């Protein structure tokens, strides 16, 4: 998940993206910079094994598989 302070959330239905883009264009420089720093901190906290594991969990959930089955042979760091 992306931290709340680093992204604008929107409803993907009913023109939510358009509203979010308008909101993003109207952000103050200070808030936009704060959000950028928060996003960078989040990105810096990730590594490829963690990202791969998180993707496997999403795929498993979408396919209705157990997380253990999807991640078999793929150890999660940490």
Image: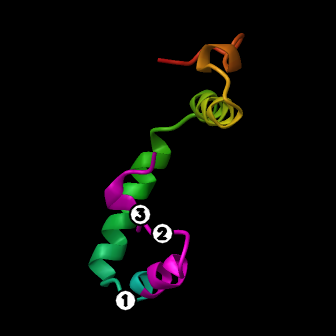
Q: Is residue 10 magenta?
A: yes
Residue span colored magenta: 1-22
Q: At 32% from the left edge and 82% from the top edge, which residue is drawn?
A: 29
In this rendering, is residue 74 above or below 32? above
In this rendering, is residue 64 above or below 77? below
Q: Is mark 2 on a helix, strand or loop?
A: loop
Mark-to-mark CA distance, 2 and 1: 18 Å
Q: Mark 2 points at which residue?
A: 11
N-terminal of the pair, mark 3 or mark 1, is 3
Q: What element carries label 3?
A: loop
Q: At 56% from the left edge and 18% from the top edge, which residue is drawn?
A: 76
Q: Name the residue under label 3.
A: 7
Q: Nearer the viewer, mark 2 or mark 1?
A: 2
Looking at the picture, how far across and down is residue 59, in whole percent?
Answer: 68, 35
> Relative to the observer, which residue lies in front, 46 or 10?
10
Looking at the picture, how far across and down is residue 57, in whole percent?
Answer: 61, 30
Q: At 41% from the left edge and 68% from the top edge, which residue is drawn?
A: 8
Looking at the picture, how far across and down is residue 16, in whole percent?
Answer: 49, 77
Q: Does the magenta stretch include residue 21?
A: yes
N-terminal of the pair, mark 2 or mark 1, is 2
Quadrant housing residue 64: top right
Mark-to-mark CA distance, 2 and 3: 13 Å
Q: How crowded is mark 2: few (under 14 residues within 10 Å), some or many (20 or more)?
A: few
Quadrant housing residue 53: top right
Mark-to-mark CA distance, 3 and 1: 14 Å
In this rendering, is residue 44 above or below 14? above
Which color scheme is applied? rainbow
Spot the residue most to the top. 73
Q: Name the residue under label 1.
A: 26
């Amino acid at each position: 998940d992306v931290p709340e302070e680093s992204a604008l959330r929107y409803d993907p239905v009913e023109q939510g993206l358009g509203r979010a883009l308008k909101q993003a264009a109207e952000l103050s420089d200070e808030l936009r910079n704060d959000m950028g720093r928060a996003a960078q901190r989040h990105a810096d906290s990730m590594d490829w094994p963690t990202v791969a594991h998180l993707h496997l969990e999403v795929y498993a959930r979408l396919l209705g598989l157990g997380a253990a089955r999807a991640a078999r042979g793929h150890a999660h760091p940490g």
